[in-house]
Image (tube, grey):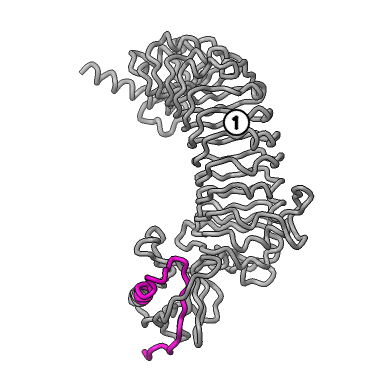
């Protein structure tokens, strides 16, 4: 084929320095020619020069002369029939099919960053799943008149090869109420201002991306903004009810203060060190800040969330439960995988707390019940306690919770004898008990003795409790009668019967091994 016309391409990248411009120029030329060979197409035009990075810090490409820009690939290609994107019609606005032999379809996203590989430029319109119209034909809403204007929800999950690298192209989505862009390679929240400022967007989820800052949230300078008010000033993002920015690289959560109407906030698995911006979020009901670097539960920030029902702070570096005195509606508290040695400051939750998760800490018997505001309080609604992987040697801290406790998880502690468990015999409502990975588990007839000691149990560790009675030759699982059937028909049995037969078969095998 004839060679492509002579054109010049300027590649702009934030990953370049003046010292390495010549080397990077050679590398880009090599990369483009290698891609062309893999796609059985003629080599694309060579890179002429590399310029300084743009203000937004994102890689972009500017083409000159006779060049066609393919948004789905993020780089210009010669306007010939034998170019790198020969499988895409020039007049078609749709992105290339991921199953084709184009570069976009064959990219290995798991190797990005290796040898300074630069991802192509993808917008939401390039990777949006096709939908069907009234005639049953597949359409791209972005390129179908009237479709994108009336769209209220946009969900694109980047788990099938093509990933969004920049937010944009949503200018006509004036009715958008929910935007979900999960598992992509978005480095910034740029381009979000028009949708946050309209006041229509109430659900924003940018889970699992590469976002480093909560940008575009703040005071509107032109008087156009969301429906939320902060200090009498209309704010961009004020209409948001749910904000999920988990699994990013955010270090400062302060801009959440500009979303005063938030009901749910998810910032798990980021790089946050301090609680900031929560004080004025008085409508929040659920906050997830797990897997960060938080050391202190700052009462100044937590005190304003009077409606909060769930607080998740697992996998941080917290040494003390504090700052929750004003959270009088808290139902679930999670501070597992931290550095706790005592349980304290739970007085305000005595009538509301339902679930308490404190596993993987260093809490012993004294630390669990010695403090006046610890587990020694007479909680009226506490149904689930998780203190697995701590330093407990008995169950005495829970003995007084007879009216409400249903699930007790204390696996992986140092409980050694049945006498250490006997205080649980007064818990009439206890349904599930996890004691595995304690020395007690090795005792003879461990499950049988626990059931005799605590008659209300229907599950010990991961297995249901089986009661065998002599009345009519019936057997029960979890207090319910089941019909005895042949062991080889257990797959067609009700679930309870199948569980019973599996466990009975296991017991026979264990008994045979002991006899041998």
Most foreground residue, 415 or 472: 415
Relative vertical location of residue 90 with respect to residue 430 in this rendering, above or below = below
At x 47% / y 26%, what residue is drawn?
Answer: 496
| Image location of residue 136, percent across then percent down | 60, 66
Residue 454 visible in this rendered orientation of the protein: yes
Relative vertical location of residue 191 with respect to residue 245 in this rendering, above or below = below
Most foreground residue, 164 or 347: 347
> Is residue 24 one of those drawn in magenta?
yes
Most foreground residue, 250 or 265: 250
At x 48% / y 32%, what residue is drawn?
Answer: 338
Q: Quadrant of the N terminus?
A: bottom left
* SS class, disc 1: strand
| Image location of residue 174, percent across then percent down | 71, 63
According to the image, label 1 marks what residue? 332
Instruction: Determine the residue located farthest toward the left in the rendered image.
Output: 516
Q: Residues within 10 Å of mark 1 (few under 14, many from 20)?
A: many
> Is residue 324 one of those drawn in magenta?
no
Relative vertical location of residue 118 with respect to residue 22 in this rendering, above or below = above
Residue 463 visible in this rendered orientation of the protein: no
Q: In which quarter of the image is the C terminus?
A: top left
At x 58% / y 44%, what residue is drawn?
Answer: 266
| Image location of residue 68, percent across then percent down | 51, 82
| Image location of residue 23, percent across then percent down | 34, 73
Residue 411: quarter of image: top left
Most foreground residue, 297 or 333: 297
The residue segment tinted magenta is 1-29
Instruction: Determine the residue located farthest toward the front in the rendered image.
Output: 19
Tell whether 444 sits left or right of 205. Answer: left
């Amino acid at each position: 084929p004839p060679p492509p016309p002579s054109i010049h391409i300027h590649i702009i990248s934030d990953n370049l320095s003046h010292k390495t411009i010549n080397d990077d120029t050679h590398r880009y030329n090599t990369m483009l020619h290698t891609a062309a060979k893999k796609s059985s197409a003629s080599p694309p035009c060579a890179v002429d020069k590399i310029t300084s990075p743009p203000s937004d810090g994102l890689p972009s490409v500017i083409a000159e002369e006779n060049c066609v820009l393919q948004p789905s690939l993020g780089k210009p290609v010669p306007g010939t029939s034998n170019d790198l994107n020969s499988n895409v019609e020039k007049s078609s606005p749709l992105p290339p099919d991921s199953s084709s032999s184009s570069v976009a379809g064959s990219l290995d996203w798991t190797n990005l960053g290796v040898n300074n590989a630069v991802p192509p430029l993808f917008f939401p319109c390039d990777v949006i799943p096709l939908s069907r119209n009234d005639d049953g034909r597949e359409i791209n809403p972005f390129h179908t008149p009237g479709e994108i204007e009336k769209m209220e929800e946009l969900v694109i999950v980047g788990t099938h090869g093509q990933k969004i690298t920049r937010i944009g192209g949503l200018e006509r989505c004036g009715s958008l109420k929910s935007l979900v862009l999960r598992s992509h390679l978005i480095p910034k929240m740029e381009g979000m201002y028009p949708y946050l400022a309209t006041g229509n967007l109430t659900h924003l989820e940018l889970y699992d991306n590469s976002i480093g800052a909560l940008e575009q949230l703040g005071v509107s300078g032109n008087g156009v903004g969301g429906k939320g008010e902060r200090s009498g000033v209309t704010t961009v993002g004020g209409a948001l009810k749910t904000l999920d920015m988990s699994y990013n690289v955010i270090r400062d959560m302060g801009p959440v203060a500009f979303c005063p109407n938030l009901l749910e906030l998810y910032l798990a698995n980021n790089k946050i060190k301090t609680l900031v911006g929560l004080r004025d979020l008085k409508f929040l009901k659920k906050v997830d800040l797990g897997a960060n670097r938080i050391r202190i539960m700052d009462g100044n920030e937590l005190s304003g969330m009077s409606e909060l029902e769930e607080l998740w702070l697992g996998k941080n570096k917290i040494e003390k439960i504090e700052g929750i005195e004003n959270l009088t509606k808290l139902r679930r508290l999670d501070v597992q995988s931290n550095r706790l040695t005592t349980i304290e400051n739970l007085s305000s939750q005595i009538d509301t707390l339902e679930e308490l998760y404190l596993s993987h800490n260093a809490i012993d018997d004294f630390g669990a019940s010695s403090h006046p505001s610890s587990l020694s309080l007479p909680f009226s609604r506490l149904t689930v306690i998780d203190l697995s992987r701590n330093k407990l040697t008995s169950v005495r801290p829970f003995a007084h919770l007879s009216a409400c406790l249903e699930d007790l998880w204390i696996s992986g502690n140092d409980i050694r004898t049945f006498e250490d468990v006997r205080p649980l015999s007064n818990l009439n409502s206890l349904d599930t008990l996890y004691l595995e990975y304690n020395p007690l588990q090795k005792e003879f007839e461990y499950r049988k003795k626990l059931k005799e000691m605590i008659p209300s149990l229907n599950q010990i560790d991961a297995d249901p409790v089986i009661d065998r009675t002599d009345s009519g030759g019936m057997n029960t699982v979890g207090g319910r009668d089941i019909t005895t059937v042949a062991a080889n028909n257990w797959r067609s049995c009700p679930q309870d019967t199948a569980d019973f037969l599996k466990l009975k078969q296991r017991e026979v095998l264990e008994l045979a091994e002991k006899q041998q």
